[in-house]
Image: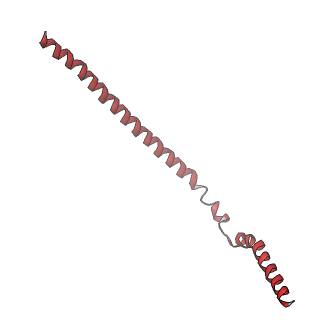
Amino acid sequence: MNTRFAKLTLATLISASIGLSPLTVMAADPAPAPAAVPATPAPAAQLEKAAKKSAKKSKKDKKAEKKAKKKSKKKAKAAQEPTAAQAPQQ
C-alpha cells in the first residue's frame, strides 16, 4: 500500500509540474517586454532593404541595357561586313 501511495504521489507531482511548466516559463521569460522596443527600428531596416533591392534591380537593368547595346553593335557590324564583303566581289 505504501508503494501505491508513493506512485500516486509521484504521478501527481509529475502531472502538476507538466501542467505548471508553461506558466513558469511565461513568468520567467522577459522577452515580451523588450520585443516592443526593436519594433520601431524595424521599419527603418525594411526601408534599407527595399532601397538595396531597388539598387539591385537597377544594376540588373543596367546590365540588360549593356547587353542590348552590345548585341545591337554586333548586329550592326554583321550587317555592314557582308555588304562590304559583297562590294569587292562584284
Foreground: 46 or 80?
Answer: 80
Measured as percent of width and height from the top left, residue 88 is found at 12, 13
From the top left corner, tell me how far across and down residue 64 is, in percent: 38, 33
Residue located 75% across and 73% down the image: 18
Specify the farthest residue to the bottom. Answer: 2
Q: Residue at x 56, y 55 (%)?
A: 41
Residue 90 position, x and y percent, is 13, 9
Image: 16 above or below 88: below
Q: Quadrant of residue 31?
A: bottom right
Q: Residue 56's quadrant in the figure?
A: top left
Looking at this view, is 37 or 84 the one in front? 84
Q: x%, y% of residue 81?
A: 20, 20
Q: Nearer the viewer, residue 41 or 50?
A: 50
In the rendered image of this protein, does residue 40 appear above or below residue 78? Answer: below
Vertical relation: 50 (above or below) 18: above
Residue at 67% x, 70% y: name it. Answer: 29
Q: Nearer the viewer, residue 6 or 14?
A: 6
Residue located farthest toward the top when viewing the structure as drawn: 90
Question: Would residue 10 be found to the left or right of residue 66 on screen?
Answer: right
5 left or right of 67 in image: right
Q: Is residue 26 left or right of residue 78?
A: right
